[in-house]
Image (spheres, rainbow, N blue to C red):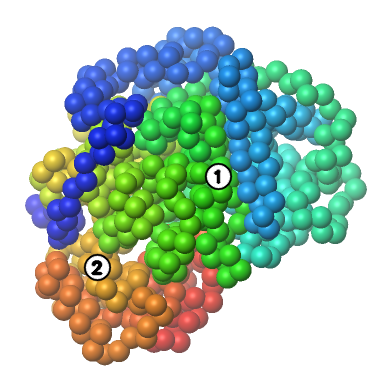
């Protein structure tokens, strides 16, 4: 049988963990990682059970560690736990009581810091306000917020009283908000009068007002004042947080939750159809995000840790809020974004707070590259000791830039592969233990049984492409699609049918493993291009394009071709706003052919100044496919960040 995807990328560079880093790391050597991995593989339930007792506080112990009735899973059933207790209360009786828990930097330059004691108090007040508004255990609360401390506080307050939160990214429209609030039957919405982004106010309350007439379940809106602009407040429905806060006590005992009670719902768009409400529960999620934060980011008590995601994404849930706070860390959030009036704001923040760990996305790294080296070079980045990336495959050249310019060849990079559905990081280097290779997420976390298989579930050979799957349940896996268990089964468990009792969680990504067992994610299988029977992943061709000095960013898609089935059409953004030419197009085609072979040679290169992206920065290749084939775009464009990009691309045709 031919491999599901062929691999063509050659990348030989290897970076060992710096010895001084390894010395003080939680996991100090490859041998230590391998020992942990083997132990977890031999008896996963025992491995997780030991960590659950060591690392978390439980009000009552569970009776069953793992109950696996595929695809239904329960972890720590019978256990009683509260994640806000683990993130806050348990630190209050230690020296961390007065440690900075949350540092917030506003875009206009204002800032606030909350110690653990202060954050605990705010969360208790917020929880009591929610209760006053009628929120009870099990009621869904919508959170539609800018990056403010109150976004974090609202999430923890929901967790404290057992009200599942449904955070909707503040950049989404009123329509997207309405759809998500209705699906979750939310009872209350938490929002703000606005937030600062790129020197302008994001008018969140306006979107809420537009959405709510068609959301019958929402009874109350709690509004945080950020910008101070005048906004309409509907009497009886809308309440200011700073008013209600005055009338409640700061005493709010955490609700003992069942380990399997819902902690939150988070919508993920998927490539087609209506967004899926990914459901995560309490105990397993708390454990897995806690331990992955500790080991993958090698979190130490002295660190200032900055994940640049928005709380509206899973990265924000797991690695801004729950993972770091459960570990007693100092987590930093930033309200805004790089903008003409302050293009170096990211580096300025690293300098100002002495950030030690910086976790961002390839889309951000690509935009830093476009801005040029002079910006990061004019700030003091010497506090950094570890870098991370998540969200898409990172092209080796972008990895090298991140390593050289931001990490100054001193900081290991953890390329973390995971998904909204997995709840936490699944494949990543542990920075003191696992040598890294640019473009590879390296090896699975202990307890994660990952593989690359064909459609029958058979492992493919070394360096052969296939489907990335997980073969054993893990504590933070999604439990279901909210209101749609059937869709859960269809989307994740049926692509590769179970055989002999072995179930395969299908991630939707193509990947290969190299001779060292390292995983190389090759992109979404929906994006695979079939040229004359060769199935090529997007990542490798794009990496070849980006390795040419003139290219800043590239996206490739397949376009129907009578002879070859499909041919490759590449959309290319050039460095330094250069304009393209026929000669350069020829040169780039040659370059790809030379780097990875004639089969991957693009039939066409289209120069552009922007690519269609989701609001989380992922390239929307299905839209490019329609453009390349000169078809009307009929699929959903509601998650598109900037609609004008499509028009510009069309005009270029
Ligand atoms: C999809 C999940 C996980 C938080 C942010 C995105 C892609 C994610 C990597 C990586 C290659 C990656 C995959 C995955 N992806 N991280 N390190 N290397 N691909 O969450 O929106 O649920 O997206 O993002 O395609 O399936 P998400």
In the picture provided, is 539 more to the left or to the right than 463? Answer: right
Which is nearer the N-term, disc 1 or disc 2? 1
In the picture provided, is 632 more to the left or to the right than 208? Answer: left
Q: How many marks?
A: 2
Q: Residue at 48%, 28% (x, y): give it.
A: 301
| Residue at the limit of the structure toward the right, as seen here | 235
Describe the element under mark 1 as helix, strand or loop: helix
Asked whether residue 282 is in view, the answer is yes
Q: Where is residue 368 in the image (x, y as percent from the top left)?
A: 43, 63
Task: Please determine whether, in this image, residue 33 is positioned above or below residue 419.
Answer: above
Dot 2, how many residues are within 10 Å of its Cα: few (below 14), some (14-19), or many (20+)? some
Q: Residue at 58%, 19% (x, y): give it.
A: 95
In the picture provided, is 498 more to the left or to the right than 104? Answer: left
Q: Where is residue 246 in the image (x, y as percent from the top left)?
A: 87, 33
Q: Where is residue 540 in the image (x, y as percent from the top left)?
A: 23, 61
Residue in front for this viewpoint, 23 or 438: 23
Task: Please determine whether, in this image, residue 313 is positioned above or below residue 572.
Answer: above
Q: Splitting the image into 4 quarters, where does residue 291 fall?
A: top left
* Image quarter of the C terminus: bottom left
| Residue at the limit of the structure toward the bottom, as seen here | 582
Q: Where is residue 502 in the image (x, y as percent from the top left)?
A: 24, 30
Label ID, residue 18: none
Task: Please determine whether, in this image, residue 426 is positioned above or below residue 573.
Answer: above
Describe the element under mark 2 as helix, strand or loop: loop
Q: Are marks 1 and 2 in contact (CB under 8 Å)?
A: no
Depth check, mark 1 against mark 2: the one in front is 1
Asked whether residue 507 is in view, the answer is no
Q: Which residue is label 1 attached to?
A: 353
Q: Which residue is label 2 attached to?
A: 547
In the picture provided, is 380 more to the left or to the right than 624? Answer: right
Q: Residue at 57%, 26% (x, y): give it.
A: 87
Residue in front for this viewpoint, 439 or 632: 439
């Amino acid at each position: 049988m031919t491999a599901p995807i062929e691999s063509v990328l050659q990348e030989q560079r290897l970076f060992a963990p710096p010895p001084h880093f390894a010395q003080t790391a939680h996991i100090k050597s490859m041998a230590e990682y391998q020992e942990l991995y083997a132990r977890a593989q031999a008896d996963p339930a025992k491995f997780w059970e030991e960590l659950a007792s060591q690392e978390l506080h439980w009000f009552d112990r569970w009776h069953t560690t793992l109950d696996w009735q595929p695809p239904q899973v329960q972890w720590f059933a019978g256990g009683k736990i509260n994640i806000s207790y683990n993130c806050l209360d348990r630190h209050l009786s230690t020296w961390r009581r007065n440690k900075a828990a949350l540092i917030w930097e506003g875009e206009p330059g204002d800032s606030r810091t909350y110690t653990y004691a202060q954050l605990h108090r705010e969360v208790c007040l917020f929880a009591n306000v929610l209760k006053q508004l009628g929120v009870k255990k099990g009621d869904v609360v919508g959170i539609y917020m800018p990056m403010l401390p109150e976004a974090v506080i609202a999430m923890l307050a929901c967790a404290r009283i057992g009200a599942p939160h449904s955070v909707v990214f503040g950049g989404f429209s009123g329509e997207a908000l309405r759809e998500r609030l209705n699906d979750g039957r939310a009872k209350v919405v938490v929002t703000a009068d606005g937030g600062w982004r790129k020197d302008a106010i994001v008018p969140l309350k306006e979107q809420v007002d537009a959405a709510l007439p068609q959301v019958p379940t929402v009874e109350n809106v709690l509004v945080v004042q950020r910008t101070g602009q005048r906004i309409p407040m509907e009497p009886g429905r809308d309440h200011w947080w700073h008013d209600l806060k005055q009338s409640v006590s700061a005493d709010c005992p955490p609700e003992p939750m069942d380990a399997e009670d819902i902690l939150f719902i988070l919508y993920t768009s998927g490539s087609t159809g209506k967004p899926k409400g990914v459901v995560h529960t309490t105990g397993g999620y708390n454990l897995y995000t806690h331990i992955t934060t500790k080991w993958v980011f090698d979190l130490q008590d002295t660190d200032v840790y900055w994940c640049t995601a928005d709380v509206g994404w899973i990265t924000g849930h797991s690695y801004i809020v729950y993972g770091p706070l459960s570990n007693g860390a100092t987590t930093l959030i930033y309200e805004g974004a790089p903008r003409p009036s302050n293009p170096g704001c990211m580096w300025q923040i690293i300098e100002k707070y002495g950030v030690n760990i910086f976790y961002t996305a390839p889309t951000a790294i690509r935009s830093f590259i476009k801005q040029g080296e002079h910006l990061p070079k004019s700030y003091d980045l010497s506090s950094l000791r570890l870098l991370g990336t998540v969200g898409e495959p990172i092209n080796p050249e972008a990895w090298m830039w991140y390593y050289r310019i931001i990490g100054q060849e001193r900081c290991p990079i953890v390329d973390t592969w995971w998904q909204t559905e997995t709840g936490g990081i699944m494949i990543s280097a542990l920075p003191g233990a696992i040598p890294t290779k640019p473009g590879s997420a390296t090896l699975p976390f202990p307890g994660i049984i990952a593989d690359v298989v064909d459609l029958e579930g058979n492992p493919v050979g070394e360096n052969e492409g296939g489907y990335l799957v997980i073969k054993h349940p893990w504590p933070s896996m999604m439990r279901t699609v909210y209101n749609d268990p059937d869709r859960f089964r269809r989307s994740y468990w049926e692509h590769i049918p179970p055989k002999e009792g072995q179930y395969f969680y299908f991630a939707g990504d193509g990947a290969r493993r190299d001779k060292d067992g390292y995983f190389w994610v090759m992109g979404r299988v929906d994006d695979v291009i079939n040229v004359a029977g060769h199935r090529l992943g997007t990542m490798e061709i794009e990496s070849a394009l980006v390795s040419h000095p003139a290219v800043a960013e590239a996206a490739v898609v397949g376009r129907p071709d009578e002879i070859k089935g499909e041919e490759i059409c590449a959309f290319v953004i050039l460095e330094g706003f250069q304009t393209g030419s026929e000669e350069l197009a020829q040169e780039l085609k040659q370059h790809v052919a030379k780097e990875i072979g004639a089969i991957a040679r693009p039939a066409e290169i289209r120069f552009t100044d922007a690519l269609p992206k989701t609001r989380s920065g992922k390239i929307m290749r299905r839209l490019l496919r329609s453009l390349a084939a000169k078809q009307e775009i009929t699929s959903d464009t509601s998650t598109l960040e900037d609609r004008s990009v499509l028009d510009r691309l069309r005009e270029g045709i």
